[in-house]
Image: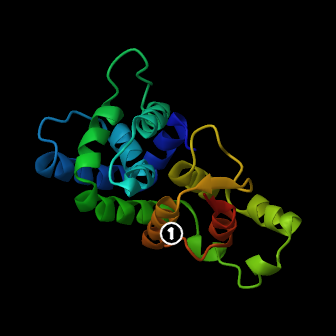
Amino acid sequence: MFTENEVNALLNYPGIFDEVADLKQKFIDEEAEFLEIEEHDFLSLILLTPSIGIALSNGSVSLFEEMALNKKARKLSKGGYWMKTDPVVFAMEHLIKGYDKWAPVFYEHIKNLMHKTVDVSALHDNSFKLGEADDSQQCAQVLKAPFVIIRFLTSFFMNDEEEDILVERKISKIEYDRVNEIAEQLGIKELPVYQIYHSKLVIK
């Protein structure tokens, strides 16, 4: 998943800082009146939206899921906040409560961010057929994908210890459906690298 330094690099792409600042103010005005958070940490919150969506697929966030989300938040936070309240963790509580309202807004921003940082259209490969690709061919497809798109995928759908999208992982049917829904909203469902990740999900 993304590191603190990489979030800072994303924020420095042309236009991103201003877009994040505008979205932050809208979120504060409409959802979290007394929230104090810098643009870096607000972008971190936005990037956590898919993980929050998956955690909420069962209707509420379990204690285990909350701990995992908090850990991811602290990895993305500017300067880290191991010994005091993390602004991303605090803001995440508001996003969880208002997920249905803000998820479409944040997903649209993430989609825009991806298109500004990588040529998403170039990632489409009409010659790649998942059902015909063996493990070696799938691995080659992942290796040739831009580093940043792998970062996006691992940040969205995996915990902070996981990096290998080629490893099978168990997931509930409701989480499986939520992952598909998020991928659709982000416009990545047809990307070979996402299809490979998705093919490794095993419904438990």
156 vs 187: above or below: above
Viewer-proximal residue among 77 and 57: 57
Label 1 residue SS: helix
- Furthest toward the top, the residue is 83
Task: Say which residue appears at 48% left-offset and 42% top-offset.
Answer: 7
Q: Quadrant of the C terminus?
A: bottom right
Asked if residue 116 shows in the view, the reply is no
Viewer-proximal residue among 173 and 6: 173
Task: Say which residue appears at 47% left-offset and 40% top-offset.
Answer: 8
Q: Is residue 139 left or right of residue 121?
A: right
* Residue 119, picture quadrant: bottom right
Q: Amino acid at mark 1?
A: Asn
Asked if residue 55 shows in the view, the reply is yes
How many marks on residues? 1
Task: Say which residue appears at 62% left-offset and 73% top-offset.
Answer: 191
74 vs 183: above or below: above
Question: To which residue does mark 1 refer?
Answer: 180
